[in-house]
Image (cartoon, rainbow, N blue to C red):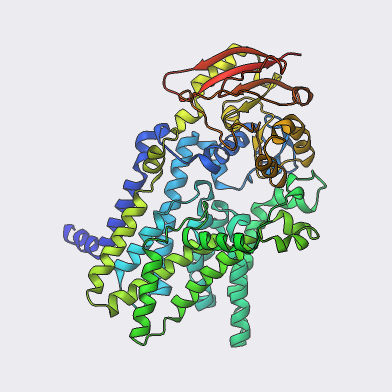
Amino acid sequence: MWSNIYTNSMKHKYKIIACLVIIAYLLPYYILGEDTHIRVHDNMDSNIVWYKLLVESGHIFSLTDVALPNVINGLPRSTLASSLDAMVWMYALFEPMTAYAIGQTVMRFVAFFGMYLLLNRHILRNQKLPFITVGVALGFALLPYWPSGMLSIAGLPLALHVFLTFREYGGKTPKYNWIILGLIPFLSNFVLTFVFFLTIMGFLWLFDWIRTKKSNWIFFSSIAFMTFIYLVQNYLLIYSMFFNEGFTSHRDELDLGHKDIPGTFNLFLHNFFYGHTHDLAEQLTIIIPVIGVALIVAAYRNLKPKLLLGLFLSSAALSLWYAFWYWEGWRVLKDQIMVLNTFNFSRFHFLTPLIWYICFALALVILWKHLKFGKVIVVVLLVAQCVNLFNLNEESKYSEAGTPTFKEFYAEELFADIEDYIGKDPSDYRVVSIGMHPTIAQYNGFYTLDTYNNSFPLSYKHQFREVIAPELGKSPSLENYFDTWGGRLYMYVAQLGESYMFTKNSDKTIEQLDINTDALEALGGDYIFSALPIDNYKTLGLQYEKSFEKKDYPWRIYLYKLEK
């Protein structure tokens, strides 16, 4: 028995080592729990709270677009995740940080095994180079993914592996591949990535049909099947968009994309070399140079790496498309065709991490086989890339950056003290936050007039703008940020700019706050939670109540009440 275990272990030694590395990467979530440092941007300031609010709302299974009173006096249910989103049920079954850790675990292991299968069975299946296939798959699994994306990017290699299997084997494809295609939609985002991925799969099927004159309906059916599952999964969004008048979203007034040609070109270069905050591939220091050297070696050895060159150029093309989506020339069409203004067609670039790591694997094969000391060089390069990615784990990255831990950020005990001091049910009054993310108050059960969401009623944005109009008037950059996008309905202060995390160690004060308190009162506002003292609170008709802080939390909250 032991000899069989040893033999199997040696046979799969690289995969076992990779899995151990992934486990080590995930350990902080399970050991530290809520004391883990995790990403704030588009994570603790938004998605985590959205899941929590939805679970607590009692409207997970709503078939109509009801309003959730906790946020902006009625946030439409359709702006939050579907009841068929697996992350919703993780938050329903577990505490938020536990759900978050489970999500990270699923994401990392699916990314690893998906990329391994893609490389081993399709891209490099004739190479027999397990160190490269496992090493590149490990690197892909350790990428600093946007946490709430789940399998939106991390699951792309697995989905591509399945589709290529259907494409090659047709009706002989093992039946479990249908199950995989049916499960991925419940763990990923259709609008973010898979609508673009499935579009490319559709073009691949069409290309095959034209080239071979064969329809391959099984391949087509697999694409249609996954698309159908996504439509079912997004039933409420589809219903609210096409079958119900519902509300007019603030996205109807988006006015993004005013870059001139030099600005567009700079955005192209930045995206090509560094990526986007939601699709980081960490390609600059190792992957791009490796590809460059591999292409030079290929030219010297008279090789024809068509796939490598084609994918490399396609990555550049996707970055170029992304940049030109924000070129001012598009405004002519965006102003005339609503869907071009409300839907971000530039997001094909979310496919680039998949492309970069396929290119990385192909380039490493060339170095391994055709460069003197190539094997040693490849080992060093793979280890260096994986070490670099391992060091970007959230605990290391954000503890060094000095951002709060999960527990510190939401500061539940501190906000419980504020609730006790006010002494009323949170549903009986409304609050706004200054110098801090409003989702902190939302997480702690307060009903907020400010928020950060992907979509909300345009009419409310106009009402809220009246409250902060005097401050927006003092800052053209903030005014442009709010008016052209406006996803963050924040109590902007020109003096503070786009900074939302002032701790109790800050020596700043808000010297002259100019807000329309009458408009705030008209929205139902009762209290202001400010991370900084407001010097002119009396002239605004505010009453200073008390400041709150606790030893283990980074905030000092100044509580002001509107005098009515």
Residue 462 visible within the image: yes
- Residue 41 point in image, percent of width and height: 53, 42
Depth order, front residue of 387/12: 387
Depth order, front residue of 167/355: 355
Q: Quadrant of residue 49?
A: top right
Residue 163 visible within the image: no
Q: Which quarter shows the N terminus? A: bottom left
Tell whether 47 sits left or right of 428.
Answer: left
Which residue corresponds to the image point at 64% horizontal and 67% vertical from the top-left?
A: 224
Q: Quadrant of residue 266?
A: bottom right
- Residue 54 point in image, percent of width and height: 62, 36
Tell whether 40 sits left or right of 10.
Answer: right
Vertical arrangement, residue 187 with respect to residue 429, above or below? below
- Residue 299 point in image, percent of width and height: 38, 84
Depth order, front residue of 460/138: 460
Vertical arrangement, residue 66 with respect to residue 291, above or below? above
Q: Residue furthest right?
A: 245
Which residue corresponds to the image point at 31% horizontal and 63% vertical from the top-left?
A: 382
Tell whether 174 sits left or right of 510.
Answer: left
- Residue 311 point in image, percent of width and height: 49, 73
**Count of marks overlaid on the render:** 0
Which residue corresponds to the image point at 53% horizontal and 76% vertical from the top-left?
A: 167
